[in-house]
Amino acid sequence: MSTKELGQKGEDLACEYLVNNGYKIIGRNYRINFGEIDIIAKKRGLFADKTIHFIEVKTSEKESDFYPEERVGYKKQNKYKRLIEVWLGKNKFPQNYPCQVDIIAVSGDKVDFFENVVSDN
């Protein structure tokens, strides 16, 4: 399986996981010249908060020795902050709209969800 196919499979499993856990997918593969956001989602339901979740998907074929949080370092976090600013602006949301960056790790058929991994500091 190519890297691109593996990534696509991981993103599909991540979307399935999110939908099954009460999220609505509002965007996928948002690209601009300096980066990409894999998945953009919001919680569904009458009493759900309005936070927008910007989700980075990390996929591995094997479950062993897979630590996705180590793959989203300082540079990637700063890039995500800039990507979110652009997305919010282009979609006419105020820059202080509630949002967070999450990671979904897909290893084999196992899906792990790490919420709010980027701090504002």
Image (spheres, grey):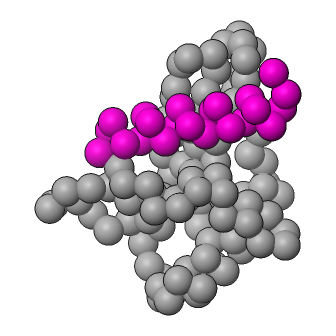
Q: Residue furthest left?
A: 46
Residue sitting at x 54%, y 19%: 110
Task: Tell me if I can see residue 58 in this picture.
Answer: no
Specify the quadrant of the image occupied by residue 22: top left
Q: Where is residue 121 in the image (x, y as percent from the top left)?
A: 63, 67
Label the magenta part by its dominant secondary structure. helix
In the rendered image, residue 6 lying in the magenta stretch gets the answer yes
Residue sitting at x 63%, y 16%: 108
Is 119 on the left-hand or right-hand side of 92? right
Would you place residue 95 above or below residue 45 in this image?
below
Q: Nearer the viewer, residue 118 or 83?
A: 83
Task: Tell me if I can see residue 2 in this picture.
Answer: yes
Would you place residue 47 above or below residue 61 in this image?
below
Is 112 on the left-hand or right-hand side of 72? left
Specify the quadrant of the image occupied by residue 33: bottom right
Q: Where is residue 2 in the image (x, y as percent from the top left)?
A: 85, 28
Is 114 on the left-hand or right-hand side of 22? right
Residue sitting at x 64%, y 20%: 107
Residue sitting at x 71%, y 74%: 82
Q: Position of residue 117 (x, y in %)?
A: 58, 49
In the rendered image, residue 71 lying in the magenta stretch gets the answer no
Q: Position of residue 89 (x, y in %)?
A: 58, 87
Quarter of the N terminus within the rendering = top right
Magenta range is: 1-22
